[in-house]
Amino acid sequence: MAESVAPIKEVLGDETVTTAAEERISVATQWQLMWWRFRKHTLAMIAAVFIIVFYLVVIAADFLSYADPSASEAQRGLLSPQPIHWFDEGRFSPYVYAMTGKRDPMTFERVYAPDLTQKVSIRLFAPGFEYKFLGLLPANVHLLGVEGAKAEDSLFLLGTDVQGRDLWSRLMYGTQTSLSIGLVSVALSLFLGVLLGGLSGFYGGLADTIIQRVIEIVRSIPTIPLWMGLAAALPKEWDVVKVYFAITVIISLMGWTDLARVVRGRFLSLREEDFVMAAELAGCGRMRIIFRHMVPSFLSHIIAATTLALPAMIISETSLSFLGLGLRPPAISWGVLLQQAQNVQSIAITPWLLIPMIPVVISILAFNFVGDGLRDAADPYGV
Amino acid sequence: MLAYIVRRFLLAIVTVVAISVLSFIVMHLSPGDYVTSYIAQMSSSGSVVSEADAAALRAQYGLDQPMYIQYLRWVGLILQGNFGMAMEWNSPVMEVIGDRLALTIVISVAAIIFTWAMALPIGIYSAVRQYSIGDYIFTFVGFIGLAVPGFMLALIVMYIGFTYFNANVGGLFSPEYDQAAWSLAKVWNLVQHLPVPAVVLGLAGTAQMIRIMRANLLDELRKPYVVTARAKGLSENRAILKYPVRVALNPFASTIGYLLPFVISGSIIVSMVLSLPTVGPLLLKALIAQDMFLAGTIILLLGILTVVGTFFSDLLLMWIDPRIRLEGK
């Protein structure tokens, strides 16, 4: 259509600019159109940056942490976050004071005081504990480290927990676990949702009725108590990896119904479209119609729905682990970290143990905004 | 209309059966059975149970039968009102759960009332005054409600209460009423303690409801009949409240069926943090002590409670929405 209009408009001079823009739109692929629209959604763009940062943390958790997350030491338990001094004698050189701890003879609490005579300077790309980058390459370089001492003994950016483990480093590893578990669970849910929703929407009839009723039943069961029961039934002797996968499956069983509904809705509306009819008349097989013709036209919606499903997965994992029924120590996740902040006494005395809440809230918000942005961008009738 | 009720009722029955099967599975997932736990408990108190006694016990409880027979027996007992014994407490399950179940209902209903009472006016306001400062503020609060899981909100409320007001906001009763028998004064005490858990529990749902209400009403407000109503000289309040709000209300009411399981699920975790005497802490305790029988029963009862609540909300919806009432006529 655009081709036939273009020559007339070019004569008008001024209009050529719009024509070029129009042409750009009419030849753009669906993904380009989506990207252009998504770009206009400022909040979603900001949120997308946050998500990218989060997943960089997932990839490089070892590098970003400076202390071995499981190195415990009672001598430095419950240290509060340490202030960083940025300038040393007028020159930019960040340092912290070494901490000394002793027991208060009256209350038997450990009290810490900075030793003002001993400066420990912070440096970038310092060697620290050994790890394998991406699980493959042996390395010992960390983003942060200290000069002339072990980072475990002297650097406490976010304080330590009861066992004296560094909260910053544990937070990095917790992010890795919590966000990857969310991703794996959502992939499993997506598989279930697309399979069952697709069957339901494409075949209709009895299959549709049964699957719809199953979804209704699953949705009307209060899931948390049920999954608590399932999670508690995991054998105590299972190791971290096994528990991780079991929890992943349990969480994904909670989340598939919404995705199934989206997929079904899309199938139902697309089934009536002319291009599906055309494909059928052209003699395409069923699988070809589904995967070559129908799926590409709602893939973007699926991606949006998946993004919106992720926060629920993160909340589930965090809640289950918080109750002690999800991942168990020595695994580290946001929920496991928050477990230490379970009662009001500990929060009042050691409020920094609540810090893991911040990434939980930010990630949930970010996924919601990006999901909303994607959904709007994927909607061809949107403004 | 009758067809609708019958269909809903049948679905509720099927759901209850599904829940009972799932609860039964949870009970039997953990290694060992009731008798193993019983033996362990007896030997910890010094007495010894012989192999023969154990076998006799197993036969008595029907544990040597195939699974489906055990399931049917269990359902049979429950239908007679026999929920069995809670091991750790050494008393009938119903006695242990009773009050706590009632309080779970009270808290959940309070949370739902809060959700409705907040979401309805705010949703209308946000739609009518779209992009006003108030709309932005409520949208922001709504996102917070969406992004902060219930247990975190509970922790934050506890922290604020403790550090700034030096008050313990947890619990449902003042200490003097905790063990007291039910009386008017105790009920009043309960009412005074309800707002905090109701708000904590209801905020996430409220956030969702505001978004739904706002979106629905915005769609309605753009329709020509609203313009007609205005053109005919209806007052602004009437033009909005009389028709668009009523239409927008419908999906709002239909989501109550999903709100209830959501709130009851949430109450389990929030109760743990705020130490509310609901079934939540009991369930966690039972799960940790591997008293799967008690845990399974709690899961079953919570499930049934939800289904009954959902069924009633369906009836309510039918009463509100003539389209459902007149369906099939």
Image (spheres, coloured by chain):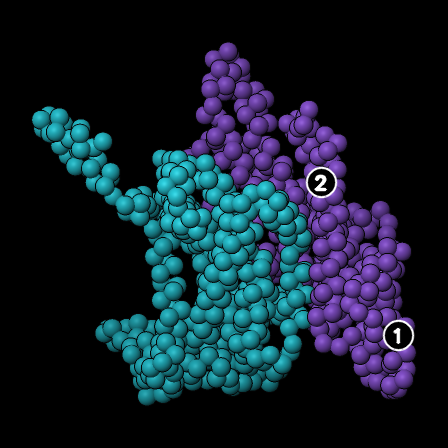
- Count of all numbered marks drawn on residues in the image: 2
Q: Residue at x 56, y 62 (%)?
A: A251
Q: Answer whether labels 2 and 1 touch (C-beta < 8 Å).
A: no
Q: Report which residue position mark 2 lands on.
A: B8
**Most foreground residue, A285 or A226:** A285
Judging by colour alone, the chain drawn in purple in this rendered image is B
Q: Residue at x 59, y 22 (%)?
A: B242
Disc 1 on helix, strand or loop? helix
Q: Is residue A68 left or right of residue A10?
A: right
Q: Earlier in the sequence, mark 2 or mark 1?
A: 2
> Residue B207, percent across and down?
54, 45
Q: Report which residue position mark 1 lands on.
A: B59
Q: Is residue B194 visible?
A: no
> Which disc number belongs to residue A160?
none
Q: Is residue A135 visible?
A: yes
Identify the chain of the residue marked 1, using the numbered disc in the image: B
Disc 2 on helix, strand or loop? helix
Q: Is residue A221 above or below residue A230?
A: above
